Amino acid sequence: MSSMKEIEKEYLKENLPIFSPGDTVKVYYRIKEGEKERTQIFEGVVISKRGDGTRETFTVRKLSFGIGIERIFPINSPRIEKIELVKEGKVRRNKLYFLRGLSSKRMKKKVSTKK
């Protein structure tokens, strides 16, 4: 193992759920507003995962009042309190960028649930 991987090992989170693109997740993210800190829940469909080790990120897309919002989260960020798997999706692709052009009704049809 290289020395870089040994150093990164300290910063990796261990209690993460296994999820993949197409799954619906809730990300509990700590936000600092002035002096206060609060937890914001961001729930949506995972449209991509990339990287490995401490550089691993995932993108979550949700629809809010008819407008699509995407957010990229580093998996090992200390700001993430927890990641909760809401629903497992069944898709045939690894990157779901085509969901950007679909309405919520069509998006739900494309990302079917596992049985």
Image (cartoon, grey):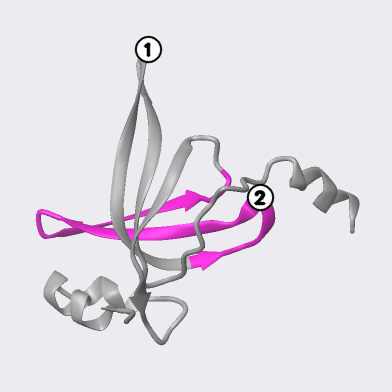
Left or right of residue 87: residue 8: right
User: Can you give x and y, in whole percent of width and height, for residue 73 in the image?
Assistant: 46, 50
Relative depth, front residue between 80 and 70:
80
Residue 80 percent coordinates (x, y): 47, 40
- The overriding secondary structure of the stretch rendered in magenta is strand
**Label 1 secondary element:** loop
Q: Please give left or right for residue 96 compared with residue 78 in the image.
A: left
- Identify the residue at image location x=37%, y=68%: 23
Q: Is residue 54 above or below residue 40?
A: below
Quadrant in the picture for residue 47:
bottom left
Residue 54 tag number: 2
Q: Residue at x 47, y 65 (%)?
A: 19
Of residue 19 and residue 8, the one placed in the foreground of this image is 19
Q: Is residue 51 magenta-colored?
A: yes
Badge 2: how crowded within 10 Å, few (<14), some, or many (20+)? some
- Residue at horizontal 48 percent and vertical 59 percent from the top: 58
| Three-letter amino acid code of the residue under disc 1 | Glu
The answer to which of 41 and 49 lies nearer the viewer is: 41
Instruction: Count the marks.
Output: 2
Q: Which mark is residue 35?
A: 1
- Image marks 2 and 1: residues in contact by CB distance under 8 Å: no
Which portion, as a residue range, is magenta? 49-76
Q: Percent position (x, y) of residue 74?
A: 53, 49
Relative to 48, is 52 on the left or the right?
Answer: right
Q: Position of residue 4 (x, y in %)?
A: 84, 50
Q: What residue type is disc 2 on?
A: Thr
Q: Residues within 10 Å of mark 1 (few under 14, many from 20)?
A: few
